[in-house]
Structure formats: C-alpha cells, structure tokens
Image (cartoon, rainbow, N blue to C red):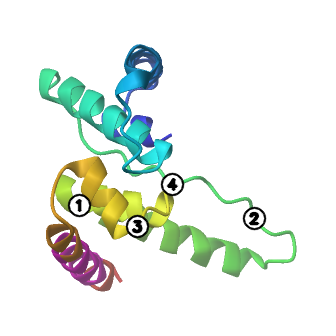
Amino acid sequence: RWLLRLVDDEALADDLLSDVFLDVWRKAGSFERRSAVSTWLLAIARHKALSARRRRTDVELNNDLASTVADPADSPELVLEKKKREELLRHSLARLSPEHGEVIDLTYYHGKSIKEIAEIIGINEATVKSRTFYARKKLAQLVAAGR
C-alpha cells in the first residue's frame, strides 16, 4: 500500500514490490543489521519508487486513505460528518509537499521512529524532526483553512 501511495499506479507498485524482493534476495548478504529488516525493505522500496516517479512526470502523491466502514450505530448525520472530515484530511494531505507527505506517511501510517525514517529517507534525525514539525504545522493550517 505504501508503494501504491508513492507511485499512484497499482501495476507499477506491484512491479516495484517484485523488484524490491528480488533485490532483497540478491543482496541479503549485504544487510548489515544496523536497523530492522522492515526499515531496510522500506528504504529499498522508497528508492525504487522515487526512481520510478522521476521517470514519470504526471505522478502525484496519492494519499488515498482506507475507506472506513460506517458504524451501523452512527446516525446519517454523523456518517456524513465523518466523510466530510476524511475528505478534508485527504485533500489536505494531498496538498503537502512530497517531503512532508512522506514523513507523515512513515510516521502515522507505518509507525516508524525518527531514527527509522532517517535511515529510510537517507537524512539525519534532526532533519526528520524538523520536517515532521513543519508537516504537522502545514497540515493543521490546511485543515483549518478547509473548514
């Protein structure tokens, strides 16, 4: 799902996932165990997705959040309000810069730590903290403006 959000093309995401596992198979001996295997896999996947995005000029970050199933106990008004909030958040996430969207995605949808995000993206931890701070700030502004 993470690859699909990065490339916005299901077939391409499937191809990239196959490439990731092929690379992991070929380079398993080079894994240095300095981080979790999942961090290593996400770093490889990120690199492949960014390379694919550079080759395609029409790609936008797709922040398609999983649709929530309406609770049968919810009133129609509450269901409508939830859908409006989800749409506002989805729209606001799509307006973030790729750098900010990426740290939000890795933090909140993948549960990665600052250290893991730094390893995946290839930047230092202070930069991850800074990007996360400004991403949250921008997201709050976008949500507030959309209300």
Image-quadrant location for residue 71: bottom right
Residue 113, by quadrant, is bottom left
Q: Earlier in the sequence, mark 3 or mark 2?
A: 2
Of labels 1 and 4, earlier in sequence is 4
Q: Which residues are drawn in magenta?
A: 130-142
Q: Which quadrant, please, contains the C terminus? A: bottom left
Percent x, y of residue 10:
46, 25
Residue in the foreground of this view, choosing between 29 and 86: 29
Alpha-carbon span between mark 1 and mark 4 = 14 Å
Which residue is disc 1 drawn over?
Answer: 95
- Disc 4/disc 2 C-alpha distance (Å): 15 Å
Pinpoint residue 34: horizontal percent, then vertical percent.
36, 49
**Picture coordinates of residue 46, whole percent (x, y):** 30, 38
Residue 96 in sight: no
First along the sequence among labels 3 and 1:
1
| Mark 3 vs mark 2, CA separation in Å | 31 Å
Q: Count neighbours of disc 1 (C-alpha within 10 A) and say few if under 14, some if 14 to 19, many if 20 or more.
A: some
**Which mark identifies residue 65?**
4
Q: Is 46 inside the magenta-drawn segment?
A: no
Label 2 sits on what residue type?
Answer: Ala
Residue 1 to residue 131: above or below: above
Q: How many marks?
A: 4
Which quadrant of the structure image shows residue 128?
bottom left
Q: Earlier in the sequence, mark 3 or mark 4?
A: 4
Residues under numbered marks 4 and 2 in contact, where contact means CB atoms less than 8 Å apart? no
